[in-house]
Image (cartoon, rainbow, N blue to C red):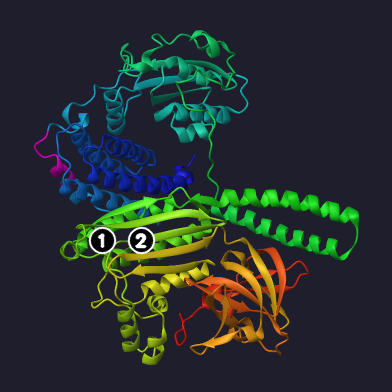
């Protein structure tokens, strides 16, 4: 089989491994004595080396092998963990990421690695020979090692040094075997679960194309004893014989009794390996406990296009379910009502399951930030600790894909604008090292993500002055803003309090982009700041962008949908209970003043006001404030499927999308975030 068929899998796993390496290297920098961090780095780097070598990317394999030599020196105490060494390893990871991107773009391995190779060599200058491949080459190939290449010899030497076994597995299929390639694939899958296949004869692509007779040979690096390997292969149907021998003719390091994995001293036949479960028939799928990993995989990779198609079909099913519910309500047919109730139960379960399939932990995006924040703090001469919590919180994959850029803006602003320099913090009586917190948590049926720092905070007076100076607000309008409304002005386009624009921030586009992106995700972003004590940004996002719960309302004869996550409550007030405050219509709700906006005016709807003396009001959260949206009628709650507006319509102010109702009519979804703009400025 052509290895290009595995390219997508290689790219995905390489990027995941590079993220893990970045995070573990940061842990090692914080605690150079942490053996677990070093072991994780070593293990992941070795996996990346093996993957790149298998795919034929020799330059990547050599670079990761040289990186392993540096890690070996650090592990053995032959070289210290210094800032220069960590910077060199980070530079190595950056280069590997660039190589992965080049491979993804079809450019191949065009990156020059000579400079970084020299830096890696310098990290262990003066130390003992860093790896067996340079100090003492492995013995020449024997009859049972398959004539290893130089790279394969390095892998074998590393495995034996680590106490792992290297076995030659010769497999013969029955003469009447009809699906030789399928049986060979099953054997290969068993060996990949047992360890790492370093060589195949004939090559794997020929085996998978059934270009072999009835026999083939694999060389496997594994922690399992020979008996368990033979048992695993024998479980595959139509295998005639399996011979397992030690490559090179000598027993691996696990053989001495002191090693735990050497409890089976002599690899007897599978049926007599040990009492109990091992006495089961050869086809038994439950190996002896403690010796091998579970045979069945708990996860499967599915293309995102298939998940999107599945969600689209689920959305159509929800629309038809709503239609059936409407028909059952319009016609008094008991059998139809019963059927609709059963269909509703099944579709609800299916909908929840599809939602869960699309969920991913926010860790996939959070892992990008520790390295970025570390490099940014170094460039600005600031000391900080980045504390991440709740990274296992799950969110819809589509939301996660869009979340990265807003969080980058917020974290860069937190480090650049929020945190003071060590000298400024000392003068303010604070520790020299600041703290930036990134957290995620579930709250109801939404996810809350917070970025918090203990820096200088936001000065509302300075915000007002900057807004007036840049022409965003007139002075009289700025003076009427509350402190919270003034702080919210940092989301205005072109408004920045930075005195100097740098390559980090200060051009007034970051926070405007944040609010635009979050509003586009049907979410909200709030700011809570205390001068001299720091700031906290709170993002609230729906769990999914595909199917949401909404409150249907009517205004000017049309039906509109308000996302339920943004709604606090609904109330009915009398016209005489409203009053103007600073020129803005407001109501008093439980001793709190709540500004009012009329939906027909916000959306510039035609038609006469059909409201009577009683005003239905939907109280929503928007931009850190509560707002009352006055509508004509409240219709009811309903699950809706979000449909994006056609691109030729452009950006429609106040509208986040559309949905199809149970009677086939189209209802627009209101963009709640656009309703709370401070007077005089369009955010």
Where 118 falls versus 231 (above or below)? below
Q: Which residues are magenta?
A: 119-127
185 left or right of 330?
Answer: left
Seen from the viewer's position, the closer of residues 232 and 456 is 456
In x, y percent, where is residue 641?
66, 64
Q: Which mark is residue 452?
A: 2
* Quadrant in which the C terminus is drawn: bottom left
Q: Is residue 539 visible?
A: yes
Quarter of the image where one finds residue 470: bottom left
Where 237 falls versus 324 (above or below)? above
Disc 1 target residue: 376
Where 218 falls versus 434 (above or below)? above
Which residue is depicted at the point 52% across and 59% down? Answer: 398
Seen from the viewer's position, the closer of residues 610 and 43 is 610
In x, y percent, where is residue 569?
62, 68
Which residue is depicted at the point 44% across and 28% down? Answer: 202
Quarter of the image where one finds residue 430: bottom left
- Judged from this view, the residue extending furthest toward the front is 591
| In this view, the mark in front (1 or 2) | 2
Q: How many marks?
A: 2
Task: Please report whichever mark, 1 or 2, sits nearer to the chain's N-terminal start.
Answer: 1
Q: Is residue 172 visible?
A: no
* Magenta residue check for 123: yes
In x, y percent, where is residue 619?
59, 72
Which residue is depicted at the point 29% across and 67% down? Answer: 418
Q: Does dot 1 land on a helix, a strand or a loop?
A: helix
Seen from the viewer's position, the closer of residues 397 and 530 is 530
Quarter of the image where one finds residue 661: bottom right
In x, y percent, where is residue 442?
51, 54
Seen from the viewer's position, the closer of residues 108 and 124 is 124
- Local crowd at mark 2 within 10 Å, few (<14), some, or many (≥20)? many
């Amino acid at each position: 089989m052509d290895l290009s068929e595995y390219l997508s899998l290689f790219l995905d796993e390489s990027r995941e491994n590079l993220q893990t390496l970045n995070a573990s290297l940061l842990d090692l920098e914080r605690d150079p004595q942490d053996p677990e961090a070093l072991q994780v780095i070593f293990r992941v780097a070795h996996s990346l080396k093996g993957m790149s070598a298998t795919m034929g990317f020799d330059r990547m394999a050599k670079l990761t092998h040289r990186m392993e030599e540096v890690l070996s020196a650090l592990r053995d105490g032959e070289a210290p963990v210094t800032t220069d060494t960590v910077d060199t390893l980070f530079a190595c990871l950056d280069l590997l990421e660039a190589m992965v991107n080049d491979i993804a773009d079809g450019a191949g391995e065009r990156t020059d690695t000579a400079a970084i190779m020299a830096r890696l060599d310098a990290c262990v200058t003066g130390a003992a020979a860093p790896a067996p491949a340079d100090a003492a080459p492995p013995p020449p190939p024997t009859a049972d090692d398959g004539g290893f290449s130089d790279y394969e010899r390095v892998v074998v030497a590393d495995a034996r040094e680590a106490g792992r076994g290297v076995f030659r597995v010769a497999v013969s299929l029955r003469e009447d075997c009809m699906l030789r390639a399928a049986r060979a694939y099953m054997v290969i899958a068993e060996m990949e679960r047992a360890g790492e296949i370093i060589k195949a004869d004939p090559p794997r692509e020929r085996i998978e194309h059934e270009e072999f007779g009835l026999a083939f040979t694999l060389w496997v690096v594994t922690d399992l004893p020979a008996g368990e390997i033979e048992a695993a292969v024998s479980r595959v149907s139509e295998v005639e014989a399996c011979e397992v021998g030690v490559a090179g003719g000598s027993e691996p390091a696990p053989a001495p009794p002191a090693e735990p994995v050497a409890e089976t001293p002599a690899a007897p036949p599978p049926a007599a390996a040990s009492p109990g479960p091992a006495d089961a028939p050869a086809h038994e799928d439950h190996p002896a406990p403690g010796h091998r990993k579970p045979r069945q995989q708990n996860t499967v990779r599915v293309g995102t296009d298939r998940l999107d198609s599945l969600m689209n079909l689920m959305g159509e099913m929800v629309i038809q379910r709503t239609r059936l519910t409407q028909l059952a309500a319009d016609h008094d047919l008991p059998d139809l009502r019963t059927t609709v109730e059963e269909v509703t139960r099944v579709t609800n379960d299916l909908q929840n399951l599809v939602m869960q399939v699309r969920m991913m932990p926010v860790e996939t995006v959070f892992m990008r930030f520790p390295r970025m924040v570390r490099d940014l703090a170094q460039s600005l001469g600031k000391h900080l600790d980045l504390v991440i919590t709740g990274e296992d919180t799950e969110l819809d994959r589509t939301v996660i894909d869009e979340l990265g850029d807003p969080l980058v803006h917020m974290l860069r602003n937190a480090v650049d604008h929020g945190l003071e320099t060590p000298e400024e913090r000392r003068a303010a009586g604070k520790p020299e090292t600041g703290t930036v917190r990134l957290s995620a948590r579930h709250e109801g049926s939404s996810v809350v993500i917070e970025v918090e720092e203990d820096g200088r905070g936001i000065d509302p007076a300075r915000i007002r002055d900057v807004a007036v100076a840049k022409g965003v607000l007139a002075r009289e309008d700025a003076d009427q803003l509350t402190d919270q409304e003034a702080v919210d002005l940092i989301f205005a386009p072109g408004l920045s309090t930075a005195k100097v624009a740098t390559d980090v921030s200060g051009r007034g586009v970051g926070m405007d982009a944040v609010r635009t992106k979050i509003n586009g995700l049907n979410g909200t972003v709030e700011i809570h700041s205390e001068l001299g004590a720091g700031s906290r940004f709170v993002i609230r996002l729906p769990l999914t962008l595909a199917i949401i719960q909404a409150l249907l309302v009517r205004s000017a004869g049309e039906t509109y949908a308000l996302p339920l996550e943004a709604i606090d409550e609904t109330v009915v007030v009398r016209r005489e209970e409203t009053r103007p405050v600073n020129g803005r219509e407001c109501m008093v709700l439980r001793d709190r003043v709540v500004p009012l906006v009329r939906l027909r005016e916000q959306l510039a709807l035609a038609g006469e006001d059909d409201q009577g003396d009683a005003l239905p009001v939907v109280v929503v959260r928007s931009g850190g404030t509560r707002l009352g949206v006055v509508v004509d009628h409240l219709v009811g709650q309903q699950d809706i499927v979000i449909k994006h507006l056609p691109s030729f319509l452009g950006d429609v102010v106040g509208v986040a999308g559309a949905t199809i109702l149970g009677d086939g009519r189209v209802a627009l979804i209101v963009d709640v975030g656009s309703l709370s703009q401070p007077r005089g400025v369009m955010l």
